[in-house]
Amino acid sequence: MARADTGPSRTPFTWGRLASTAVLVLVAILWLGPYAWMTLTSLRTLPEIVAAPAYPFPRTFQLGAYREVLEAIPVARYLLNTVVMAGLIATLQIALALPAGYALAKLHFTGKRAAFGLVMACLLIPAQVTFVPVYTMLGALGLVNTLGALVLPFGVSALGTFLVRQALLSVPDEVIEAARMDGASEVYIIYGVLGPMLRPTLAALFLFSFVFHYNDYFWPLIMTTDDHVRTLPLAVALLREQGTGVRWHIVMAGNVILSLPVLAVFAAAQRHILRAVTARG
């Protein structure tokens, strides 16, 4: 005798699932806690912060700190400079990592292992070690205080080349051979065939690169001398120096404004990665 359909099956309750959910909620709270504290502090007044610095909740929500930030620095210009710089670096890294990773993963040439070893060695060298010769070279070319000086030194990414190379190792060679038999050029194979297949990897690379260079303080501090190409992290750091003492509500408001584009890019990249993984599944 056939059993009656009782509707969609439900996942049975287990203490292990409850513990996992509790741990995830706790991690989310610990992760979002500092950002929530920063946002709430930006809505307080300076006397409130001085009277009770450990109490984050404002008596009344005040937007005066945001008005002072917008009056103190040209936020729109700095934000545009920062987004353009980080976006160009991430795009250039992807454009160059694809052919470099393709060569290391799918082509056969003398010195291939040595080239890959050189890429891995570059991962061990921090940018601060090479900034003096790079600064000297850019200064000789007249690129100091230009957008090119902020973008060009980071156009090639050893991490991006490594990630693309590792992702391409899982792509069957038959895909490339089929494209060649159809008359596709190597450029089209790299960007038109393999590029869409590596969408999750490229989205992750764009996210890592954008967030890192968007928040970079060291290199823009060295390469910029005026407001023409100065980035927003530098401007937010200057908020602390204005007036006497640290006006924490203004500093926190500046950091909230600074973090909004990064959160938007992260949300967009996260959805893109999830769609790509779902499509593969």
Image (spheres, rainbow, N blue to C red):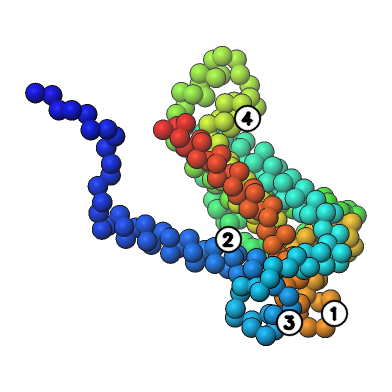
Give the residue type at disc 3: Pro
Which image quadrant is residue 230 in?
Answer: bottom right
- Compared across the picture, whether 159 is left or right of 173 comes to right
Q: Which residue is mark 4?
A: 191
The residues tagged by marks 2 and 3 sit, at their Cα atoms, a distance apart of: 47 Å
Q: Secondary structure at mark 1?
A: loop
Q: Which residue is mark 3?
A: 47
In the rendered image, the vertical position of residue 240 relative to residue 97, given as above or below: below
- Compared across the picture, whether 276 is left or right of 10 comes to right
Q: Which residue is mark 1?
A: 243
Q: Residue furthest top?
A: 182
The residues tagged by marks 3 and 1 sit, at their Cα atoms, a distance apart of: 15 Å
> Which of pointers 4 and 1 lies earlier in the amino acid sequence?
4
Q: Secondary structure at mark 2?
A: loop
Looking at the rendered image, the quarter that the C terminus falls into is top left
Give the residue type at disc 4: Tyr
Q: Which residue is mark 2?
A: 124
Q: Residues within 10 Å of mark 1 (few under 14, many from 20)?
A: few
* Disc 4 versus disc 1: nearer the observer: 1
* Disc 2 versus disc 1: nearer the observer: 1
Q: Is residue 164 visible?
A: no
In the rendered image, the vertical position of residue 55 relative to residue 117, given as above or below: below
> Which of pointers 4 and 2 lies earlier in the amino acid sequence?
2
> Which of pointers 3 and 4 lies earlier in the amino acid sequence?
3
Give the residue type at disc 1: Gly
Q: Position of residue 69 (x, y in %)?
A: 81, 65
**Picture residue at 83% right of the left edge, 62% below the top:** 70
